[in-house]
Image: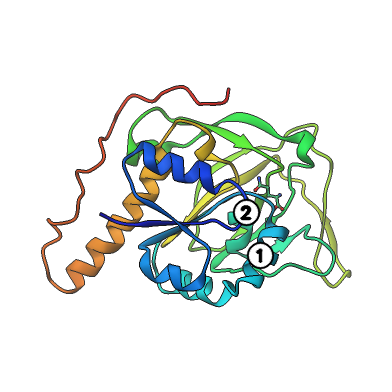
């Protein structure tokens, strides 16, 4: 069975571990670079990205994380994890912040405002439902959440949401202080996939809807199947039937 690593430096890693347990999958907490060698995929949880980046630096994780993402193993960033994976982040603290990168997008670190502007909403997720069953919406828990302002052409958008009316207006500076632009669209992207990378601005691990975790596990199976077919071996030994599909969904833990 595939072993899913969960970066356990800071943030909601316990909740991801519990979400994996609920669907019978083994999660392993990852705190050291060498532990990445023993996992098939990796979840980077939500939390506070600046603090997480400092801890990642302290534990010398960045080179190993970049190698992991570049090596094509599935990686899923939720919230602060999304910020980690973005090629570019705006709205970051003065002095900058180290990113893992790999995901061709620009993320705004606190797009929806402060902790007080945290919210929950129903998101339309037809592509998730197509793969994992259930209804066409999922509960999005947004906690001081980032959002994706722009994506490259290889990035598939899995969910967007209306920009809340009470969101403080933000100015996106180009970094050199020269150009400034106000985000003016009425919707913003909150979930994407680019090859082996999945990223969500919200927290599926805080709901009892397991479909995002299952979707991520399916990415792992796809990458194994590709590796097997490249070796012209049968992929029948992959445990594709491990997880029950189209199981009725429970209510979210937090409503
Ligand atoms: N819930 C979260 O992960 C919030 C992320 C937060 N906006 C940050 O900068 O890190």
State the image coordinates of residue 69 (x, y, percent, origin top left): 47, 69
| Residue at mark 1 | 55
Residue sticking out furthest to the right = 178
On the question of residue 80 being in view, the answer is yes
**Residue drawn 35% across the image and 55% down it:** 219
Residue 105, visible in the rendered structure: no
Point out residue 90 in the picture as x, y percentages from the top left corner: 75, 60
Q: Secondary structure at mark 2?
A: loop
Q: Are marks 2 and 1 in contact (CB under 8 Å)?
A: yes
Q: Nearer the viewer, residue 10 or 132?
A: 10
Q: Residue at x 73, y 34 (%)?
A: 164
Residue tagged 2: 10
Q: Is mark 1 within 8 Å of ligand 1?
A: no
The answer to whether 34 is drawn above or below residue 222 in the figure is below
Disc 2 residue: CB within 8 Å of ligand 1? no
Q: CA distance from mark 2 to mark 1?
A: 8 Å
Mark 1: secondary structure: helix
The image quadrant where one finds the N terminus is bottom left
Instruction: Count the numbered circles shown.
Output: 2
- 70 shown above or below 194: below
Q: Which is more N-terminal, label 1 or label 2?
A: 2
Residue at point 70%, 62% (across, down): 89
Q: Point out residue 21 in the picture as x, y percentages from the top left corner.
A: 38, 41
Q: Quadrant of the C terminus?
A: top right
> Would residue 3 be found to the left or right of residue 176 on screen?
left
- Residue 143 vs 83, above or below: the answer is above
């Amino acid at each position: 069975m595939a072993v899913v690593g969960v970066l356990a430096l800071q943030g909601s890693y316990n909740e991801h571990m519990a979400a994996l347990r609920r669907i019978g999958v083994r999660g392993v907490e990852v705190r050291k670079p060498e532990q990445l060698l023993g996992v098939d995929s990796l979840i980077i949880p939500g939390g506070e990205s600046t603090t997480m980046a400092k801890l990642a630096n302290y534990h010398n994780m960045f080179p190993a994380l970049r190698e992991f993402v570049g090596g094509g193993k599935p990686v899923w960033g939720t919230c602060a994890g999304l910020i980690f994976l973005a090629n570019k982040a705006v709205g970051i603290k003065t002095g900058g912040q180290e990113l893992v990168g790999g995901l061709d997008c620009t993320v705004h670190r606190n797009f929806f405002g402060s902790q007080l502007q945290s919210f929950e909403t129903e998101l339309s997720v037809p592509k998730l439902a197509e793969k994992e069953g259930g209804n066409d919406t999922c509960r999005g828990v947004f906690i001081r959440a980032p959002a994706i302002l722009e994506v490259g052409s290889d990035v598939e958008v899995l969910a967007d949401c209306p920009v809340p009316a009470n969101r403080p207006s933000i100015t996106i500076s180009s970094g050199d202080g020269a150009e400034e632009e106000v985000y003016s669209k009425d919707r913003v992207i909150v979930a994407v996939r680019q090859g082996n990378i999945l990223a969500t601005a919200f927290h599926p691990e805080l709901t009892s809807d397991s479909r995002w975790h299952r979707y991520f596990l399916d990415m792992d199976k796809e990458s194994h199947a590709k590796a097997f077919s490249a070796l012209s071996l049968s992929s029948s030994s992959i445990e594709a039937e491990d997880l029950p599909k189209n199981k009725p969904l429970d209510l979210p833990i937090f409503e």
